Image (cartoon, helix red, strand yellow):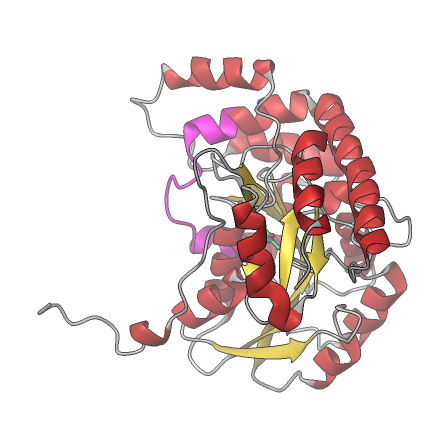
Amino acid sequence: MSVRTRADLASLPSYVPGRTIPGAIKLASNEVSAGPLPSVVKAIAEAATAVNRYPDNGCTELTGRIADKLGVPVDHVALGCGSVTLCQQLVQATCTENDEVLFAWRSFEAYPIVTHVSGAKQIRVPLTDEHVHDLDAMAAAITPNTRMVFVCNPNNPTGTALRTEEIEAFIAKVPRDVLVVLDEAYKEFVDDAHVPDGVELAKQQWAAGHDNVAVLRTFSKAYGLAGLRVGYAVAQPAVADALRKVYVPFSVNAIAQVAAMASLDAEDELMARCRAIVAERTRVRGELLAMGFDVPETQANFVWLPLGERTAAFNEHCLAHKVIVRAFVGEGARVTIGEPEENEAFLAAARSFTS
Ligand SMILES: *Cc1c(COP(=O)(O)O)cnc(C)c1O
């Protein structure tokens, strides 16, 4: 090719999406297995008739709905084309070359990519032996160049969650010009009262003068709209404004905006689904533990099996049983909690794994 691309592009890791194989059960992408609610499909179909028009660039109505629901002013909410895009916008808004973005590892695999694309430097702090964020080590890793810290709670792919007092103690150690981002993509699956609602925690931090706390949420997981790409940030107005500055115009499309509002209308029904997934999570983890697998306690819609060198074999074994899991070779496998019969198929595969 004669086109000259960035010299560092080759070193950029590619995002690896969960695999889709016809006829196989997909437990690889933390999606909700149940399809969209009829009321949401109806809203999507109606919105389809107006797609000759550009979407509302400010997502005004949806922003208002989210602000109302969370009890924050509208200038504290910024929408994005999926919260992964908001991750990228946050890095773009806070970092230039040589600035540092800090995060735990292993965590959400988009963090290294969005950091690298922006030309910033990534600082990875290993999880503890219990697969939890090592907040003491993270605080110690902050330098004068640190601009942002991602705290994924619950953590993808381990499912482990931090408690309120742990996060508060961490924020107390972070300089106030460093943005702390609580990525709460799986918040709706949390059932441990010690794990904070990040938005409530952020409100308290703001009231205490810590403006440097922001929260990311998404409609992709609990709300079942992964295919439509819509997420949001809740932050102080200056941070939300910064996000809007680097927003790719019209990137939250019109159908996504309408579907998100229809999903807020159907929140009770969707949250009932989440509770069923949480019950299945408890059952699946219990069965895996009984089979002798190590499975950290999880607050998300997936379980983590730290299989180390056995991960690749486990992945192949599950595929042979027509179950797709998400393998991080050499580390472990992440398995999404699906419908009961899907989970049964996975458990049957796990039960016959011997190597
Ligand atoms: C799935 C996920 C997201 C992003 O979801 P979007 O579909 O981009 O909204 C963000 N953070 C974490 C940790 C995730 O697992």
Is residue 6 visible from the viewing direction of this image?
yes
Q: In the picture provided, is 176 more to the left or to the right than 241?
A: right
- Quadrant location of the N terminus in the rendered image: bottom left
Of residues 252 and 343, which is closer to you in this image? 343
Say how many tags the image has: 0
Quadrant position of residue 305: bottom right
Q: Which residues are magenta?
A: 242-258
Q: Would residue 274 appear left or right of 309 to someone viewing this image?
A: right
- Which of 13 and 235 lies nearest the eye of the viewer? 13
Identify the residue shown where x is 50% and y is 80%: 99
User: Does the stretch in magenta take in 250?
Assistant: yes
Q: Spot the residue most to the left.
A: 2
Residue at 62% of width from left, 27% of height from top? 34
In percent of the image, x 55 and y 64: which residue is there? 312
Residue 326 visible in the current orientation: no
Q: x and y percent of residue 343 in the render? A: 69, 38
Q: Which of the pair 27/228 is nearer the observer?
A: 27
Q: Is residue 280 above or below residue 197?
A: above
Q: Position of residue 249 (x, y in %)?
A: 37, 44
The quarter of the displayed image where residue 204 is located: bottom right
Residue at horizontal 53%, vertical 58%? 87
x, y percent for residue 85: 48, 52
Q: Position of residue 266 (x, y in %)?
A: 68, 21
Quadrant where the image shows the C terminus: bottom right
83 lies left or right of 207 = left
Residue 163: name its quadrant: bottom right
Is 226 magenta? The answer is: no
